[in-house]
Image (cartoon, helix red, strand yellow):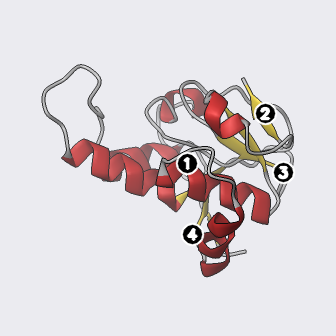
Amino acid sequence: MPTMRRSISCSPAPTREASTRYAGSALGCRRRHAVASASAITGRGSSNDIFLSAASIWEITIKYALNRGRPTDMPVSGPQALAHFMAAGYAFLSVTGEHAAAVSRLPDLHRDPFDRIIVAQALYEPLRLITHDAQVGAYSDSIELV
């Protein structure tokens, strides 16, 4: 699996919960993590590793660029979000050709391409996906709705 591990100290370091407040998803640990306003995938590496999909940074970057002055607009840019995730010590999960091909095996339950690639990553690796999105939760029993 092409992951990049970074452990960056930052004073004060943002918490994992604060770092993921605006993320579309994060990929993560064997334990249950309720990540505020985000999804997490668990199951690989040490019991405390949380992985972030490159698709999440891509989604944040696109949504930030589309800001139209609404209160629901993405408040941080892709580079800002990446810096927060790195400072919080997340491991990064690249999107591979295998992940992209795994999307074709998903039922058509949800149209969001970012959510679909993250579900495919979780099922392919395998990693446990923790989400607040009921549509994402419908893909598999290994996806935990929080």
Q: Which numbered disc, 4 or 1, marks the residue that appears first in the sequence?
A: 4
Q: Give the distance between the C-alpha atoms of the residues marked 3 and 2, in whole angstroms.
A: 12 Å
Q: Earlier in the sequence, mark 4 or mark 2?
A: 4
Q: Who comes first in sequence, dot 3 or dot 2?
A: 3
Q: Is residue 6 above or below residue 65?
A: below
Query: Is residue 13 visible to us here?
Result: no
- The residue indicated by pointer 2 is 144
- Picture residue at 13% right of the left edge, 33% below the top: 68
Percent x, y of residue 75: 28, 32
Query: Few, some or many C-alpha atoms within 10 Å of disc 1 (few <14, some 14-19, many ≥20)?
Result: many
Can residue 94 be spotted in the picture?
Answer: yes
**89 relative to 141 in the view: left or right:** left
Read off the residue under disc 4.
95
- In the image, residue 138 above or below residue 145: below
Q: Residues within 10 Å of mark 2 (few under 14, many from 20)?
A: many
Residue 14's label in the rendered image is none
| Nearest-to-viewer mark from 3 and 2 | 2
Rounded to the nearest angstrom, the CA distance separating label 4 from label 2 is 22 Å
